[in-house]
Amino acid sequence: MVCALGAAGCFGTATVLQAMAARAADTGGGGEAALLLRAVRQWRYLAGLALDGLGFLLQVAALRSTPIYAVGAALASSLAVTAVVAARLLRVPLSGREWGAVGVVCAGLALLGVASGTEGDRGGSSALEYATLATAVAVLLLGLGAGRLPERGRAAVLGLGAGLGFGVVEVAVRLVDSLAPSELLASPATYALLLGGGAAFLSLTSAVQRGSVTTATAAMVIGETIGPAAVGVVWLGDRTREGLAWVAALGFLVAVVGALALARFGEAPRRTPPRPASPERPAPLADPGVYPGPSRRPGP
């Protein structure tokens, strides 16, 4: 559980650092490629990438010893980390409701920490491995065909697809039995992990470019928590401590609901630039509001 929380902390902090680097680089001309080249020269962007890598290693370690339902809820809590770090470093004001949501997430994770047992002792069947790979392929096709989706509800559908892709990664990590190169290449779970991560990133990128960040992130949280948790309990044997199943269920629900309340932080916020002064409307003394910017809790 410590590894899962560490991964959430890494992902949430990396999102803000990358947003700060992108904002600092967004001062010259050129397109997206030029912006990216300027961003990667920023130490904050490189630090964010390093935290992404560390977070993924911690996620893998957590999934190898902790039930998927606990890891999924902990990773969703990276939104709370992003919110708190953004409030500090980007001076993004949090409402009282959002501070309350951060507290709700922490309470849910505390309940999960108390009630979570060890990872399940069941090995995944070949059918489950191929089903996981098929889900990854479906998410990839969804992301590639995003332009054909109806505009109404597109962000929700793509966000849910991204969540399922990240969920595929969580399940695939558990299904990998050996790190021997020959067995890795022969396992469908290996390809499910790679395709799932790439497809999730593609779907989420399309979702936030074509619709509401809040809607896409909320759908993503649902997709990456509920489905993988069910797979872990039903097919992989994940359990809770004796007599504490209801505590784990309550903690999972509380943590996910709290994360949903922080869905606008699915991309790190940027401050709104001040409006120019006019005789009727003087320039504001400080940034009055926020809007979501192009950053996201990275996945594998």
Image: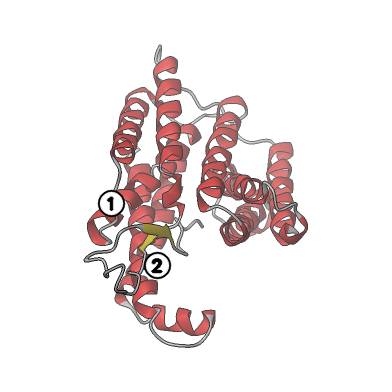
**Residue 229, picture quadrant:** top right
- Indicate whether 219 appears above or below 36: above
| CA neighbours of label 1 inside 10 A, class few (<14), some (14 to 19), many (20+) | some
Q: Is residue 268 visible?
A: no
Read off the residue under disc 2: 49
Residue at screen point 29% across, 47% down: 94
Up/down of 289 relative to 124, above or below: below
* Callouts 2 and 1 close, C-beta under 8 Å: no
In the image, taking residue 267 as reference, residue 113 lies left or right, namely left
Q: Position of residue 282 (x, y in %)?
A: 26, 69
Which of the labelled discs sits on residue 93, or is there none? 1
Whether residue 24 is visible to the viewer of this picture, yes or no, is: yes
In the displayed orientation, state which residue is furthest to the top: 243
* Residue 261, percent from left and from top: 42, 38
**Residue name at image x 40 percent, y 14 percent:** 242
Select label 2 or label 1 by which is in front.
1
Q: Is residue 213 shown left or right of residue 93?
A: right
User: Is tag 2's residue or tag 1's residue first in the polypeptide sequence?
Assistant: 2
Question: Front-most of 261 and 175?
Answer: 261
Quadrant of the rendered image containing residue 288: bottom left
What SS does tag 2 mark? Answer: helix
- Residue 111's place in the image compared with 227, above or below, is above
Nearer to us in this view, 154 or 166: 154
Which residue lies most toward the front here? 280
Q: Amino acid at mark 2?
A: Leu
Q: Quadrant of the N terminus?
A: top left
What mark, if any, has residue 5 been given in the picture?
none
Viewer-side residue, 152 vs 219: 152
